[in-house]
Amino acid sequence: METKTQSNGSRLVTLAAPAAADRALAAPISESTARVMGTMAVLGIGVIHILDSAGTYHSTRWIFWAYIALIAASVPAAIVLLHWTSVLAWALVTGVAAGPLIAYLWSRSIGLPGDASDIGNWLCTLGMVALFVESSLLALSITRIRAGTRSR
């Protein structure tokens, strides 16, 4: 913020004026900080699904393999996000966050094929942690995508 001193004769008045109107607003966090936070969230999604995968192996095998695919996708997505500043890297992370988020909502509302036991089980502790991490990552990645497309 710039400051200007204006005299009213007594020389006691100091006014704080906003910066020039044409200057862009400063980003709340830097791109590198956002990438580190995003990387930790992507890896967190992988760890959450590792913890939950053991219970799905015997009950619903296809969900277990979907978890394995998500876990396998989270590692390269984290590496890409950590090493490259790109809207495409954030788009990849958006998919890693949105996929399991949508699947969780679907499984709890109308049920997934072969897994009707989770319908209405909204308060599963690990599920709530997953929802928090996935929705936070989704919000961060959408924000970074919008910032990246505006700067072009």
Image (cartoon, rainbow, N blue to C red):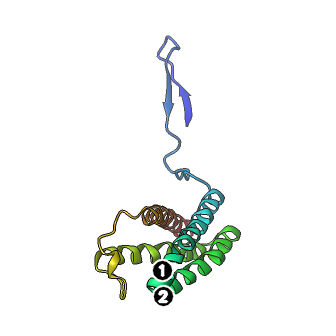
Residue drawn 51% across and 19% down? 7
Q: What element carries label 1?
A: helix
Q: What residue type is labelled 1?
A: Thr
In this view, the residue in front, 90 or 101, is 101
Instruction: Name the residue that disc number 2 marks.
Output: 61
Callout 1 crowding tier (Cα within 10 Å): few <14, some 14–19, many ≥20: some
Instruction: Name the residue that disc number 1 marks.
Output: 56
> How far apart are the two marked residues, 1 and 2, measured between alpha carbons?
6 Å
Residue furthest to the top:
10
67 left or right, relative to 40: left
Q: Earlier in the sequence, mark 1 or mark 2?
A: 1
Q: What residue type is labelled 2?
A: Arg
Q: Is mark 2 on a helix, strand or loop?
A: helix
* Residue 26 visible to an observer of this rendering: yes
119 left or right, relative to 72: left
Q: In this view, does 66 lie above or below 109?
A: below
Q: Are marks 1 and 2 in contact (CB under 8 Å)?
A: yes
Residue drawn 51% across and 72% down? 52
In this view, the residue in front, 10 or 142, is 142
User: In which image quadrant can residue 103 be found?
Assistant: bottom left
In this view, the residue in front, 22 or 48, is 48
In this view, the residue in front, 44 or 61, is 61
Residue drawn 49% across and 34% down? 17
